[in-house]
Amino acid sequence: MILRPIATAQELDFYIRPMVSVSNAYRIELTNDSTNETQTITPTLTASDTFTRTFNATFTGLTEATWYTIALFEYNAGNIKRLCYGKVYVTAQTDLDKYTLNSGRYTEHDAGASSREYITY
């Protein structure tokens, strides 16, 4: 997941188990991996389907070029359940689709009539 170092709402998509209720309260904890400082956010649920939840959340003080640990929690009648846990990178770049880890390292080949494609390194 990628966040921008801005103090306005950003959209976050989480892939979760289908047994989670959309009517419960949610919290996001974002911890800076360098400073170990954590901020807890109450996000706004904007979309939901069987396996995903989309939230809008506003974070403050995000440091560019920094890794964070993110966790999504569900609160229901005193019970707290961690739904997702992962890493977030903060960058001001917006043209991320131009970059790939393997750019120019692989050659794609078409196998012809069998309709199978394969790559070589």
Image: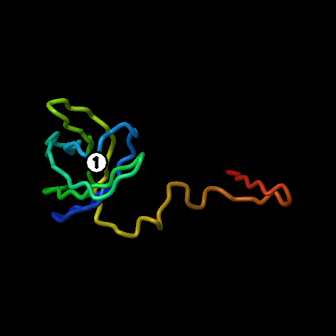
Secondary structure state at the residue bearing disc 1:
strand
Residue density around tag 1, few if under 14, some if 14–19, many if 20 or more, within 10 Å: some
Q: Residue at x 60, y 61 (%)?
A: 104
Picture coordinates of residue 65, whole percent (x, y) = 28, 56
Q: In this view, does 14 lie to the left or right of 73?
A: right
Query: How many numbered marks are there?
Result: 1
The three-letter code of the residue at mark 1 reads Trp
Picture coordinates of residue 21, whole percent (x, y) = 30, 41
Q: In which quarter of the image is residue 36?
A: top left
Q: Is residue 102 left or right of residue 107?
A: left
Picture coordinates of residue 59, whole percent (x, y) = 17, 56
> Which residue is under mark 1?
67
Q: Residue at x 16, y 33 (%)?
A: 77
Residue furthest right in the image: 113
Q: Quadrant of residue 40?
A: top left
Q: Please, which colouring scheme is shown?
A: rainbow
Q: Which of these two is toward me, 68 or 11?
A: 11
Residue furthest top in the image: 79
Picture coordinates of residue 71, whole percent (x, y) = 26, 40
Q: Is residue 10 above or below residue 15?
A: below
Q: Which residue is drawn at 29% across and 60% down?
A: 11
Q: In this view, does 22 lie above or below 4?
A: above
Q: Which of these two is toward me, 2 or 25?
A: 25
Q: Is residue 91 left or right of residue 79?
A: right
